[in-house]
Image (cartoon, rainbow, N blue to C red):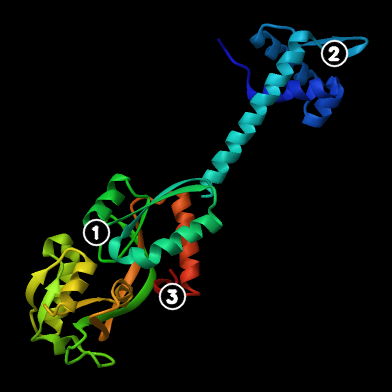
Amino acid sequence: MSLPELRQLRYFVAVAEHLSFTTAARELHLAQQSLSQQIAALERTVGARLLDRDTRGTRLTEPGRLFLAEARAVLDAADRAVAVARRAESGELGRLRLGFLASVANYMLPLVVRACREHLPDVEVSTADTAIDPLVAGLRDGTFDLAFTRPPLVPDLNTRTLAREPVCAVLPASHRLAGRAAVALAELAGEPWVLTPRSSWPPWHDKYDRDFSAAGFRPDVVQRAATVPNLLGLVAAGVGVTRLAASARTLRDTGVVFVPIEGDAAETVAAWHTLSPAAERLVKLLAELSERVDLTSAG
């Protein structure tokens, strides 16, 4: 069974509201003959006479009266559907599944969620903090629309830098260099080190290797730990030293000291595989915010 076209419903509603083909045609910027033909086609499709038209004027039939209410509802629904699609295209509607690298979640997650609530109130937001490997896998397979993490990542992911902060040597509070304002990485050549497993994210460890090599040594790694809190705990226990972004100091305030490493910095980036309209809108909001405030201390 064929169904009426939306334009035919709009024509019918205009005639029904004015009870005048002449007035409706003028409002619709349509020739009166063409309007009459469209209403006749609509009546054939519906299988009922909707309007009576004679020398006394135009009147709704009983089927036409009932049809008018339904036609208005259909047109209202169509208008709503168009509005929803347009808002979704502009990033005002939809959903955002956000992934956070565990070590940046402490400052980025509150900031990002506040930005969504303030600027994207009609976007459904879900969050998860995770290690780097499942974060990258989640971006690739669509589990996450957008993630907040640290480079380097992989070639098929896109990134935008949102923050930059010092990298610090994390030392036991009693360490001989704990009182320094800054240290060179080479000054830590003889120290025992605690680092994450090399398998946790090879691109990071490739960069670490280059940095240590440039400083003239290969670290003596005495223990490995998978998370930043565990690394901090090992440093506090005197097992060794490590290097972390300055923002990691918010995860532990006893037993360790953060001393900036000269010339070393870490970035926080937004990362994505395919950017949805809502994700694009959020990235732009955060990029604009990053020009005004330090995101690593704004969470």
The location of residue 206, given as percent across then percent down, is 15, 69
* Left or right placement of residue 262 versus residue 10 in this view: left
Residue 269 visible, this angle: no
Q: Nearer the viewer, mark 1 or mark 2?
A: 1
Q: Earlier in the sequence, mark 1 or mark 2?
A: 2
SS for dot 1: helix
> Which residue is label 3 attached to?
294
Q: CA distance from mark 3 to mark 2?
A: 68 Å
Q: Quadrant of residue 255?
A: bottom left
SS for dot 2: strand
**Amino acid type at image mark 2:** Arg
Residue 197 visible, this angle: yes
**Amino acid type at image mark 1:** Ile
**Amino acid type at image mark 3:** Asp
> Which residue is label 1 attached to?
132
Nearest the eye: 185 or 172: 172
* Left or right placement of residue 298 versus residue 263 in this view: right
Q: Residue at x 23, y 81 (%)?
A: 256
Q: CA distance from mark 3 to mark 1?
A: 23 Å
The location of residue 237, given as percent across then percent down, is 15, 77
Q: Residue at x 46, y 71 (%)?
A: 290
Nearest the eye: 154 or 44: 154
Q: Residue at x 50, y 75 (%)?
A: 292
Nearest the eye: 29 or 103: 103
Q: Earlier in the sequence, mark 3 or mark 2?
A: 2
